[in-house]
Amino acid sequence: MGFTNTLLELLKNQQPTHLAVVFDTDAPTSRHIEFEAYKAHREKMPEDLATAIPYIFRLIEGFNIPIITQDGFEADDIIGTLAKKAEKKGFTVYCMTPDKDFGQLVSENIFIYKPARMGNGAETLGIPEILAKWEISDVSQVIDILGLWGDAVDNIPGIPGIGEKTAKKLVQEFGSVESIIENSDKLKGKLKENVENFAEQGLISKKLATILLDVPIELDEKSLEREDANRDLLEPLFSELEFRTLGKRVFGDDFSITDANGKTGAGQMDLFAPATIATAPADALPEPAIPTRHIHNTPHTYILLDTMDAQQDLAKELSHKKSFCFDTETTSLDALTAEIVGISFAFEKGKAYYIPTTADWESAKATANIFKEVLENPLIEKVGQNLKYDILLLSRYGIKVQGPLFDTMIAHYLIDPDTRHNMDILSQNYLGYSPVSIKELIGPKGKNQLNMRDVEIEKVKEYAAEDADITWQLHEVLKPLLADTKTLELAQTVEFPLIYVLAEVEKNGVKVDVETLRSFSNLLQADIQRLEQTIYDKAGAQFNIASPKQLGEILFDKLQLDPKAKKTKTGQYKTGEDVLLTLAHKSDIVQDILDFRQLQKLKSTYVDALPGLINPETGFIHTSYNQAVAATGRLSSTNPNLQNIPIRTEKGREVRKAFIARDASHVLLSADYSQIELRLIAALSEDQNMLEAFRAGHDIHRATAARVYGIGLDEVNADQRRNAKAVNFGIIYGQSAFGLSQSLGIPRKEAGAMIDQYFTQYAGIRRYMSRAVEFAKENGYVETLLKRRRYLRDINSANMTVRGFAERNAINAPIQGSAADLIKVAMINIQQDIERLGLQGKMIMQVHDELVFDVPRSEAEQLSGIIRDRMQGAIALEVPIEVEVGKGDNWLEAH
DNA sequence: TCATGGGTAA
DNA sequence: CGGTGGTACCCATGAG
């Protein structure tokens, strides 16, 4: 589908006059001959391509596209050579292939064509885009970066210790791999060492990455001229593959599947996306690459309002608007300590206002309060980028923002969750406009970075007003895109209203008992020291146990615990928990090390870190929820991450005891969805057996064990239940038989048999899984109950690992994402009830399937009921939803 | 400051 | 034949 879609889109958008598809052949190329490792890599090409290729050829034949191959040369080289020749003849050339492969080729007439992803228009990458993307001054330097950094996909090694950032920096500074090697004396330390020791490898990598432009092949443009598609060939193919939508797109609505049964093989089919080359005469090119727009070459009216009269006039004007954009400039990124420096407003393209405030808190508050009425007006929509920040900030100034929201960051998160959503990138991509960088204003990150307040007001005005202007413009672009992707409703009914709830939860904060943590810390410290000593004694040496490097050397060099010890890619021994566990029987030092690690982790990450995160003003911990990072729709939590507080081990649970109610008159309520993901998979798959188990109120893991082992419910023993539980969870994530055997410590065959048996019993679930993958292959995305989308661009990849990843996501994203939908709806409804009823209880945490509240004892019962009802009733489903509500003085008791 | 290895949660 | 569930966050080390 990747190939098919891309092809259709190209034909439609670019309307190429000439087109060819280029393939590799089996014949060895110079790279194979010169570089052994590369050869090995290339020969590993998956055999399932073989099943796909017949379809591909039929498709290409159906579209009447010539195929070009050349023994001894790789497709990229052929395309490169032809592209250069075509360029000389005045053609505009589009290469469809990853940009890292073709970056070096891009020139005036050669572009990389990137097909549209849903919600994202098709792009052509020209010189400016490549330069910006790679941060280089010349397109040929793409291969220098690959020479240094390498490329895992194509098995190009690069130079060890040099990642993407370092590679870019070095190339910026020295220009090429050769020059870096020549000037290696200007480098320092390990970097210098690596460049010198691996110079040869760097050069080889560069050569491997270089596209050859001297393939002995002629450009016969006559033979590449486009011809009409051959319907007689394509129609049966589309029918066979069940490409209904595509068929309609190509042949119009009268196309229909003729034989729904002839679908054998479609499931395993793999349509890969070979590089294609499309050419069109230069004068027929519809749109030239747009030069980057920025503040200096774009007309704009940014107005500084520094008198109260002018500010009041603006406030009045805003009060008549249905919608406006606002943005605050502050002294810090932390909304709970930041102070306002100024506010900007925008409501028409190209025009914005900036209102500065003084450093004095009261006077800043007075200025902000001029806009209190419009900001609190429940009928006016507020547009912004990351509005949660502004809402939290303003709440500290006594302004309670109300009304519908439109957050451009979250809007884009719904349009395409896997990409980035910061304003600069959105502006570049959707407006073709490059905003003033914050770095230009306050300097680069570091100790010398200025405070927004230290910057000249004129400059801040330009920056701040531009921000509001861009955000306003983005909102105009993104809103229709939300509609196009059918996510507008999700945005307006769930994600945007949730912003208020999250702001509230963050503001409420969690109380932690510092004393509990301090004394626990001391206990841990004593244990850690004892273990340390034991380990030194057993090892016969003192070393830093927390250093994987030193630990590996002790275990495998000195103690020789495993002659076949595995190493990481940097040559260190692997010392992860799974590795150590397999060695536990060889020496009891291993268990000591594991214990040491556990305690050390607990102490440093939780016990000692949490007190430092208490806000001195409030005495509470205020985490920050990010609503736009997890591609499945889940929230994430930072500073601290309250979503990974230990619970599985005895000692870990101690940490939870330190999370307490705000005072003796309050208690914590913890409400937990029970097995929500399994219930959702049952509902989505409509598997009758699993639905029945839930409806009957059975323990689902026990019920599964009974089915898988073919025994009665009460005959299930603990082991069988444990195994069944592992399968249930494995299924959700698309775990393999190998994975299951690992996590259960049983032979792979046994695990495989269990999975087979599972699917026999729960045939609906197997059907759901293949349906999800099919849907993704057909549509390029999957969706949740509330139509939250996730695009899976790799779903048709030829690379088994990459494709497998996409396939697992196709199965998992709707489940995990629907669970996220559910709890988000519940959160909004609960918060509404709390406000409507004027309750004092507060929502203080969300942990994916759990909500925690800090409530007056007198409200505990009433709120428990509300919470349970709202969580159970969030979305009506064909499966009963169970919520467990617990109560206690601390989180552990409540959970 | 950055990369790496490791570990925690749902 | 080898590799074999995912995401997100945070910590310490080691070298700059």
Image (cartoon, coloured by chain):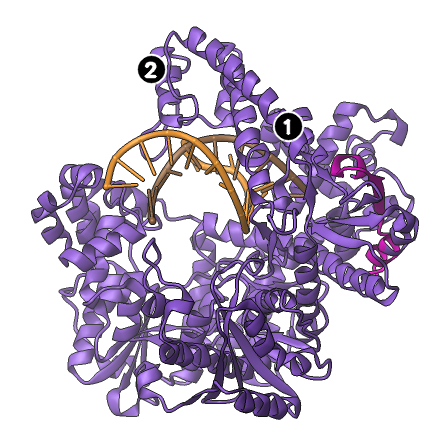
Chain colours: A purple, B brown, C orange
Camera-side residue of A296 and A112: A296
Circle 2 is placed at which residue position? A557
Q: Residue at x 34, y 90 (%)?
A: A286
Q: Secondary structure at mark 1?
A: helix
Picture quadrant where residue A814 is located: bottom right
The kind of residue tagged 2 is Asp
Total marks shown come to 2
Give the side of residue A380 with respect to residue A449, left or right.
Answer: right
Q: Which amino acid type corresponds to the residue marked 1 in the rendered image?
A: Leu
Question: Which residue does the image show at 72% across and 72% down from the upper left?
Answer: A493
Image vertical order of residue A190 relative to residue A186, above or below: above
Q: Nearer the viewer, mark 2 or mark 1?
A: 2
Query: Which residue is labeled 1 in the image?
Result: A744
- Which of the two discs, 2 and 1, labels the residue nearer the N terminus? 2
The label number, if any, that marks residue A595 in the structure image: none
Q: Residue A883: where, in percent of width, then height?
A: 84, 48
Question: Considering only vertical position in the picture, is A570 above or below A491?
Answer: above
Rounded to the nearest angstrom, the CA distance separating label 2 from label 1 is: 30 Å
Residue most extreme to the left: A182
Front one among A255 and A781: A781
Q: Is residue A61 left or right of residue A623?
A: left
Pick the quarter of the image with the C terminus of chain A. top right
The magenta stretch spans residue A878: yes
Q: Quadrant of residue A197?
A: top left
Q: Residues within 10 Å of mark 2 (few under 14, many from 20)?
A: some
Residue occupying the point 34% across, 12% down: A558
Say which chain tag 1 marks.
A
- What range is drawn magenta here? A867-894
Is residue A706 located in the magenta-colored stretch of the structure? no
Visible residue check, residue A208: no
